[in-house]
Image: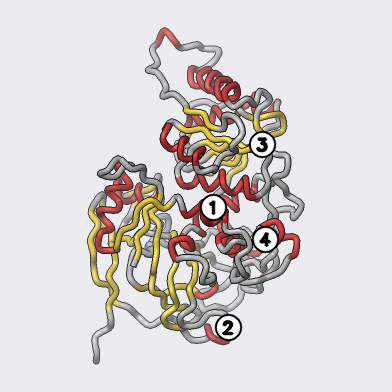
């Protein structure tokens, strides 16, 4: 019997223990495609796993392949794919969606009875599916491997064709862009998807947000200008926000955001948050915790610098840091919305609940994404999302380029590229935050 072909993978065995290993390459199962992975972006969760062997509460319990911001090319089709997904063929270039929900199907592929239907998948919120398995995440066990490998088998319905005008590295950005498309829908400034929902095997239409959601006339503030925060800024502008500003503790990143027009060009659009001083017992105030007092003070200073005395309509909190979450409440105008995008402090020592309640500030959780990839590919290929949504036309993400500005702006986030056999060096660079020449590190891509 001939030996199975193998695929090289970067496998994490523990903190900083990343090894290149051969993995057997099986033929794709029915409903799957085999892919050659071309580009994978490293994100913050990948870095947490690499440095600590865990991401928050999720610790690796067996060797795990990281990577979930990926694109590739189809090299083989499993049984049934050609007839069920005629747009997927060998040689088609795709963006890869890495969350695999249950879709209200049994393990044998049959539909569940009405009483067992997954309410989240059937309501176009499959990101909340209790049985969802996410590539490169240790949340479920056995873990589902991620994309830092040469070839992989993956569900056909999670593959989204990309046009020739979109590079593999741009297509890999569809994943973090999806995070912000979902958060923007949750915050009420982005139209709902007009595509059939991927969370349902019956392909029902999505309905999680009102198609009339609009960013027009809204002033948006983004906390944190790493890759996710910068995408939040770019998308808010693309959606028609009146003004987009940003807050960070890193002056270089803020300067990049302003220089590359991720923030609004008129007036001061960035604020560098000073690092907090050490707190002594003399500074404590039983009537107002020190972190709340400091959040108020920092918010007042930021609003003064940004010349927005009445605050912002929409805030994307992309750091997860307690100081920024608290500060965001005091940076809002009346009736504003705060989208909690960053995954950081699991518990806050105190929170200005009265200020949030009396000002009718909505705190909105946002976790990963659902039904965003088609719009992400459209944006990366140059389509105007608002125009596309109004038309309601389905193009499978391969329409002609109309406006390449947004895609070109996002491409500037990719600052460094490495081959798979240097994945460990890529993670070390991401951890340092600067390269050997002092250059800023934003998005690192592993490419083949």
Distance from the alpha carbon under mark 4 to that under mark 3? 23 Å
Give coordinates of residue 346: x percent, y percent: 46, 38
Q: Mark 2, residues whose alpha carbon is within 10 Å: few (<14), some, or many (≥20)?
A: few
Instruction: Give the residue at x 59% y 27%.
Output: 306
For mark 4, give the secondary structure.
loop
Place residue 168 in its image quadrant.
bottom left
Q: Which residue is mark 1?
A: 179
Residue 193: give its label.
Answer: 4
Circle 4 crowding by C-alpha within 10 Å: few under 14, some 14–19, many from 20:
many
| 422, above or below 296, in the image | below
Judged by depth in the image, the label closer to the viewer, 3 or 1, is 3
- Quarter of the figure with the N terminus: bottom left
Are dots 2 and 3 in contact, CB under 8 Å? no
Q: CA–CA distance between discs 4 and 1?
A: 14 Å
Proximity of marks 4 and 1: CB atoms separated by less than 8 Å: no
Question: Left or right: 177 with respect to 56?
Answer: right
Structural crowding at the residue carrying mark 1, measured as other residues with C-alpha within 10 Å and reported as few (<14), some (14–19) or many (≥20): many
Provide the residue designation for mark 2.
Answer: 86
Q: Position of residue 67 (x, y in %)?
A: 38, 59
Q: Which mark is residue 219?
A: 3
């Amino acid at each position: 019997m001939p030996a199975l072909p193998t695929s090289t993978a970067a496998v994490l065995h523990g903190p900083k223990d990343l090894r290149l290993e051969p993995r057997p390459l099986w033929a794709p199962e029915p409903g799957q495609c085999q892919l050659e992975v071309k580009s994978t972006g490293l994100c913050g969760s990948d870095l947490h796993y690499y440095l600590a062997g865990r991401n928050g509460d999720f610790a690796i319990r067996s060797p795990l392949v990281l990577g979930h911001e990926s694109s590739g090319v189809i090299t083989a089709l499993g049984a049934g794919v050609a007839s069920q997904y005629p747009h997927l063929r060998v040689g088609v270039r795709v963006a890869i969606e890495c969350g695999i929900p249950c879709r209200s199907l049994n393990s044998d592929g049959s539909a569940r009875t009405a009483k067992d239907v997954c309410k989240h998948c059937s309501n176009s919120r499959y990101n909340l599916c209790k049985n969802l398995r996410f590539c490169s995440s240790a949340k479920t066990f056995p873990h589902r491997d991620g994309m830092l490998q040469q070839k992989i088998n993956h569900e056909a319905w999670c593959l989204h064709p990309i046009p020739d005008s979109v590079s593999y590295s741009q297509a890999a950005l569809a994943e973090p862009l999806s995070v912000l498309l979902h958060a923007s829908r949750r915050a009420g400034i982005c139209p709902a998807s007009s595509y059939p929902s991927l969370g349902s095997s019956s392909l029902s239409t999505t309905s999680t947000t009102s198609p009339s959601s609009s960013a027009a006339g809204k002033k948006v503030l983004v906390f944190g200008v790493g890759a996710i925060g910068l995408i939040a800024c770019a998308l808010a502008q693309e959606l028609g926000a009146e003004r987009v500003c940003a807050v960070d503790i890193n002056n270089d990143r803020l300067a990049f955001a302003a220089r590359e027009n991720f923030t609004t060009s008129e007036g001061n659009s960035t604020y560098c948050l000073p690092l907090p001083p050490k707190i002594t017992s003399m500074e404590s105030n039983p009537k107002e915790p020190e972190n709340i007092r400091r959040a108020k003070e920092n918010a007042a200073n930021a609003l003064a610098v940004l010349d927005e005395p009445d605050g912002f309509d929409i805030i994307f909190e992309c750091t997860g840091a307690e100081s920024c979450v608290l500060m965001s409440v005091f940076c809002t105008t009346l009736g504003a919305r705060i989208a909690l995008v960053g995954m950081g402090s699991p518990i806050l020592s105190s929170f200005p609940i009265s200020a949030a309640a009396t000002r009718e500030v909505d705190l909105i959780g946002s976790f990963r994404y659902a039904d965003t990839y088609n719009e992400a590919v459209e944006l990366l290929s140059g389509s105007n999302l608002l125009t596309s949504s109004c038309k309601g036309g389905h193009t499978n993400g391969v329409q002609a380029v109309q406006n390449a500005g947004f895609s070109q702006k996002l491409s500037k986030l990719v600052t460094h590229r490495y081959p798979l056999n240097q994945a460990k060096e890529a993670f070390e660079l991401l951890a340092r935050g600067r390269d050997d020449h002092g250059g800023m590190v934003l998005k690192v891509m592993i490419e083949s």
